[in-house]
Image (cartoon, rainbow, N blue to C red):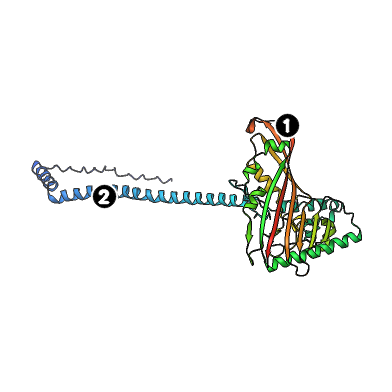
Amino acid sequence: MKKEKIKKEKAPKVKKEKKVKEKKVQSPEERAQFEAAVKGFTSSGVFKALVVMFVCSLVFTMFSSSILRLTAIPGALRARASAIQQSNAQNSQNNQNNIIDNIVDVFVPETTSASIDVQGTTAPATTAAPTTTKAPDTTKAPETTKAPETTKAPETTKAPETTKPTTTEPLTDSKEMIKEKKVVLKTYKNVVNSANTIKPGFTKIQYRTVEKDSNAGKFFKNVEKNYPGYFVSQADAEAAPYVSPKLSDMTLFLIENENLACLLEEKNASEAIRRVEKENQSDGSVKITIVLRNEENPAVTPTDESKPLSHTSSMFPVVDKENIKQKLVVRQSPLISIKDVNLLYHDCTLEIIYMPKTGKIVSVTQTVQYDCVVDYDFHMGLGSLGISIMPDQQAVGAVTDTAVYTDFVY
C-alpha cells in the first residue's frame, strides 16, 4: 500500500505590522523657547566675536597671499635683470675679445736718419722694413721646384741676405782699384769714428733744396712751404748755424749714429763705392773724396745699429720711401691720387780734410742727392665722382741735402 503522503499544513503567515514612527511635534511653547535661545545666542558677544574672527582670518589670508605675490615680483624682476645683465656682459666681453683679436699692431717707430720735419701733418713715418723684406720674394722661385724643401723658408740663416744692400750699377773694378777703395775707406773710417769717440766740438750748417720738373711744379709746387723744417735755404742755414760744444752728443754728426760715424765695411768697398780720391794739400792736410754708387730706395739703418741695412745709409743720412709717400698723400691735391713713390739716391759724395799726423778733422762736406719720383693719376672732379682723365702720370723732384762741418775743437 502506498503510503499516503501526509501533507503538512503550513501555518498561515502573519504579516508583520510596520511600526510607524510617530513624528514628534513641537509644541508652540517649545518652538518659541528654541527660537528664543537661537536669537539669544546670535545676539550674544561670543557669536559676534566668532564672526569677527572669521572675517579677519579671511581678510588676512587674502592680504597675505597678495603680499607674497607682490614681494615675489621684485625678486623675480631682479633675478631676470641680473640674468640679462650677465648675458649682456658676456656678449660685450665676447665682442671686445673679437675686436682685440682683430686688431693688428701697425705701429712701427720711425728710424730715419734724416726724418722730414713735418709741421702740421700727422702722417706717421715708417722704417725701412718694407723695403728689406723684398729679398725673400726673389728667393722663393727655386723653392717651388722642390716640394720637400719648401719647409726651409722659415729658416733665419739667410736673414742677412734679405737686408744686403744692392746698387743699380755694375761692378767693373780691377784688383788694384778694389785695393785702393779699401785703403781709402779704412782711413776715412779711422778718422771719423775716432772723432765720434773723442767728441770734439764743431759747427754744422745744413740746407736742403729741391728742383721740380713741370708736373711736380704744378701739383707739388708748395712742398717747400709745407715742410719748412726740412727744406731750408743755404742763406737761412748760414744765418743760424748749429754749434755743438765739445763732449756733446754726436748723433748729429754725419750719419746720426750713437756710436759710429761710418758703418760701411771694407769688404763692401768695391760694391758700394763708385770712386775714391786722396790728395795731399799744401798745408800738410789730406783731402779724401768718396762717391757712392746709385741705390734705389735704400733701407734706413736705425741709430743704434752697428751693421748697415744699405750702402747709402752706412755713410749718409737717408729717408724712407714710405715716409715720403705718406707725407705727400696727406697734403696731395684733391685732383690727384698718389700711387707710389720711389727714391733714387745718386752721386752721394763725402769730402773730408784732416791732418794725417794727429788725425784731427779740419772740415767735412757731405752731399746727399736723390730723385723723388711720384707716380699718380690726375682726376677731373672731386672724390668718388672724379674721372681719371690722365692716368699713370709721373712727377720728379731732385732733392739735394748738403751738410758742412767746420771749426772742430779737440
Residue 155 spot, x, y in % from top left = 78, 60
* Residue drawn where x is 52% and y is 51% of the image: 90
Q: Which residue is mark 2?
A: 60
Q: Of residues 251 and 321, which is closer to you in this image? A: 251
> Do the numbered discs 1 and 2 sit on residues whose CB atoms are within 8 Å?
no
The amino acid on which the numbered mark 2 sits, given as a three-letter code, is: Phe
Q: Of residues 337 and 358, which is closer to you in this image? A: 358
Residue 344 spot, x, y in % from top left = 77, 47
Vertical order, 355 against 113 (above or below): below
Q: Are there few (<14), some (14-19), or many (20+) residues within 10 Å of tag 2?
A: few
Of tags 1 and 2, the one toward the viewer is: 1
Q: Of residues 287 and 179, which is closer to you in this image? A: 287
Q: Of residues 107 and 34, which is closer to you in this image? A: 107
SS category of the residue bearing label 1: strand
SS category of the residue bearing label 2: helix
Residue 147 spot, x, y in % from top left = 84, 53
Q: Which residue is mark 1?
A: 390
